[in-house]
């Protein structure tokens, strides 16, 4: 049986270890002019998975928020009060992946 960690790679970014998937195609661009978004103000407390659960219906879409906002490798640097784009319909984003 294959390990679920078979395609997982650890990377160091700014001295912090980060898990990155070899299968994830995060380099695809999302045409922001073709998806409906709303803007929220980051409260400085919620993790990306919590924001995804609240706004997109599932914590598994945390990467959508980081991708749309250009934070994929740097989301821990997000400051309280920062404005974030959130897709109104996550399926509009998933269509590009």
Image (tube, rainbow, N blue to C red):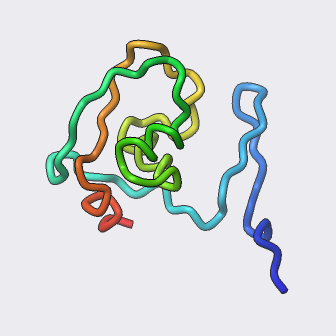
Q: Nearer the viewer, residue 12 or 36?
A: 36
Whole-percent x, y for residue 31 in the image: 23, 51
Q: How many labels does the image show?
A: 0
Which quarter of the picture shows residue 67?
Answer: top left
Q: Which residue is drawn at 35% across and 43% down?
A: 55
Whole-percent x, y for residue 21 in the image: 65, 59
Q: Which residue is drawn at 45% across and 38% down?
A: 51
Q: Is residue 31 left or right of residue 73?
A: left
- Residue furthest bottom as drawn: 1
Q: Which of 58 and 16 is in front in this view?
A: 58
Q: In this view, does 12 lie to the left or right of 51?
A: right
Q: Residue at x 51, y 37 (%)?
A: 48
When the figure is inspected, residue 18 is found, relative to residue 29, above or below; the finding is above
Q: Which of 58 and 26 is in front in this view?
A: 58
When the figure is inspected, residue 78 is found, relative to residue 57, above or below; the finding is above
Q: In this view, does 22 lie to the left or right of 82?
A: right
Q: Residue at x 84, y 86 (%)?
A: 1
Q: In this view, does 41 lie to the left or right of 10?
A: left
Which quarter of the picture shows residue 11?
Answer: top right
Which quarter of the figure is the C terminus placed in?
A: bottom left
When the figure is inspected, residue 26 is found, relative to residue 80, above or below; the finding is below
Q: Which of 88 and 93 is in front in this view?
A: 88
Whole-percent x, y for residue 49 in the image: 53, 43
């Amino acid at each position: 049986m294959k390990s679920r960690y078979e395609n997982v790679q650890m990377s160091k970014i700014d001295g912090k270890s980060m898990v990155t998937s070899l299968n994830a195609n995060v380099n695809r661009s999302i045409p922001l002019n073709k998806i409906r978004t709303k803007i929220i103000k980051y409260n400085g407390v919620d993790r990306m998975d919590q924001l995804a659960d609240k706004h997109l219906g599932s914590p598994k879409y945390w990467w959508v928020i980081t991708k749309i906002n250009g934070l994929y490798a740097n989301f821990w640097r997000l400051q309280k009060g920062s404005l974030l784009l959130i897709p109104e319909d996550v399926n509009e984003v998933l269509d590009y992946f």
